[in-house]
Amino acid sequence: MKASPLVLLMMGSDTDLPVMQEAADILDLFSIPYEMRISSAHRSPVRTLALASESAGRGVKIIIAGAGMAAHLAGVVASKTILPVIGVPMPGGALNGVDALYATVQMPGGIPVATMAIGKAGAKNAGLFAVQILALTEPLLAESLVRYRVEMDRELEQKDADLQTRIG
Ligand code: RP5
């Protein structure tokens, strides 16, 4: 049986998937059960509101919402739940994601959205931020995060050693 999702991964369009996959990859890496849904604040507002308002009752702990252009998805979702919402602005469009960044980050006081960077780095960090929140009450997850950082450090050290060899 599939474990019930702890993270709801939402995106405004299927065109967001290549970016949002970065968040999914991190959740997979840490074995966090999640559900991925396409739902738009503008094109499918009723379904978006339902997904947001039903999520806590279904055992979801954190929502990650990625959208581009006039990116209202994360903010609209946050308005319907008290779960932490992490927003990821999508790149692309005439303004290459700056529009989505402003739309996601500039929330009015009272309804917070934890906004990440534009694009793949933001989606990856959204996944990691969700894991960090879950790790507050899961010591084994906290240990995995520490190991992840140690491994990152090791990889960089190796890259530096390779560089030193190349340049003599
Ligand atoms: C937003 O509009 C989506 O999140 C997407 O980033 C952007 C463009 O959507 P498509 O026209 O590619 O479906 O709602």
Image (cartoon, rainbow, N blue to C red):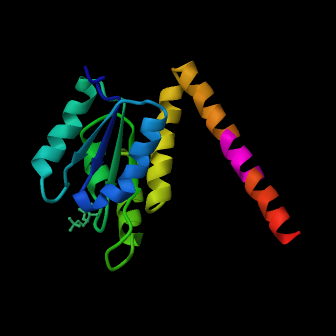
The majority secondary structure of the magenta stretch comes to helix
How many numbered marks, from 0 up?
Answer: 0
Q: Residue at x 35, y 72 (%)?
A: 92
Residue 70 x/y as whole percent: 28, 66
Q: Residue furthest bottom?
A: 94
Whether residue 68 appears in this view of the structure is yes
- Quadrant placement of the C terminus: bottom right
- Quadrant placement of the N terminus: top left
4 with respect to 88 (left or right):
left
63 with respect to 125 (left or right):
left
For the record, the magenta segment spans: 151-157
Residue 101 x/y as whole percent: 41, 64
Residue 51 x/y as whole percent: 19, 39
94 with respect to 121 (left or right):
left
Q: Quadrant of ligand 1?
A: bottom left
Whether residue 13 appears in this view of the structure is no
In which quarter of the view is residue 99 placed?
bottom left
Near-viewer residue (167 or 51): 167
Residue 64 part of the magenta-drawn span: no
Q: Residue at x 39, y 44 (%)?
A: 24
Q: Is residue 36 above or below residue 71?
A: above
Residue 114 x/y as whole percent: 44, 47
Q: Residue at x 62, y 26 (%)?
A: 143
In which quarter of the view is residue 94 placed?
bottom left
